[in-house]
Amino acid sequence: MSTTMSYRRRSKDELAARVAQDIFDGAVVNLGIGQPTRVANHLPPGREVILHSENGILGMGPAPAEGQEDYDLINAGKQPVTLLAGGAYFHHADSFAMMRGGHIDICVLGAFQVSATGDLANWSTGEEGAIPAVGGAMDLATGARQTWVMMDLLTKQGASKLVERCTYPLTGLACVKRVYTDLATFECTPQGLVLIDVVEGLAREALQAMVGLPLR
C-alpha cells in the first residue's frame, strides 16, 4: 500500500470543530490559552456545554463579533469573550477550587510534548530567555476528570510532539486522555497510543513514521 497519497492538514478551526464534536452534552469544560479557545466557536447547536475560565468565569459564550469586544470581560488569556444567560463571575480562589476539586469534566490544553502514556509537558521548553508560564495548567491537568490536548502533531522542525518520554519539564503524569492534532486523533493509554482517526489521504504507515511510535 502506498504511503505517499496526498492529504490536507486540519486548519485550526477544523481542529477546534473536531474537539468540540466529542464534548458531551452538559459538560463543564475549561479551554486553555491559545488554540483551545477556538473550541468555544464550534460547539454543536443544541448541546449545552458550560465553559469555565480559571480567572473566574462560568458560562462563557463564543468570541464576540468584531467591534463588540468588552475588555472588562476577558478569559485567562486576556482575550475578550461573551457571557451566556446564567453565566457568573467569581473569585480566582473559587475558580481554582473548582479545578482542584474535580468539578471540571474536561480541560483542553495546548502542549509542547505528550508521552504515549499521557504525560504532559506544556509550560516550559527550557529555552534560554523564554518565560515559563505554568498558570493553572498543573491544577487543570490533575484536577479535571479528563485532560485533552489540542496541538500540531509536528514541530516547525518536523519532530513529533508525541514522544515515548517527555524531555521538557512535566506538567502532569499520565493525565492526558486524548490528543487532537492537525493530522490525527489519538488516545493515550498505559499500553501506549491508540489511533482514533486520521485525515483523509494520510496512510497509517506514513503517520506512524511521523510519530515514530507504535499505534494501536
Image: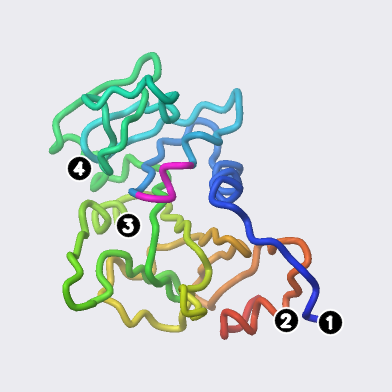
Q: Distance between the residues labelled 4 and 3?
A: 12 Å
**Looking at the image, residue 17 lies above or below residue 203:** above
Q: Distance between the residues labelled 2 and 3?
A: 31 Å
* Disc ID at residue 96: 4
What stretch of residues is rendered in magenta?
A: 34-38
Of mark 4 and mark 2, the one earlier in the sequence is 4
Horizontal side of 94 relative to 197 (left or right) equals left
Residue name at image x 47 percent, y 79 percent: 157
Which residue position is annotated with label 2?
205
Of mark 2 and mark 1, the one earlier in the sequence is 1
Q: Check disc 1 and give the amino acid type.
A: Ser
Which residue position is annotated with label 3?
141
Residue name at image x 24 percent, y 27 percent: 71
Q: Distance between the residues labelled 1 and 3?
A: 39 Å
Horizontal side of 21 relative to 1 (left or right) equals left
Q: Check disc 3 and give the amino acid type.
A: Ala
Observer able to see residue 48: yes
Q: Quadrant of the N terminus?
A: bottom right
Image location of residue 16, percent across then percent down: 54, 46
The residue lying toward the viewer, choosing from 173 and 207, is 207
Of mark 2 and mark 3, the one earlier in the sequence is 3
Q: Is mark 4 on a helix, strand or loop?
A: helix
Q: Nearer the viewer, mark 2 or mark 3?
A: 2
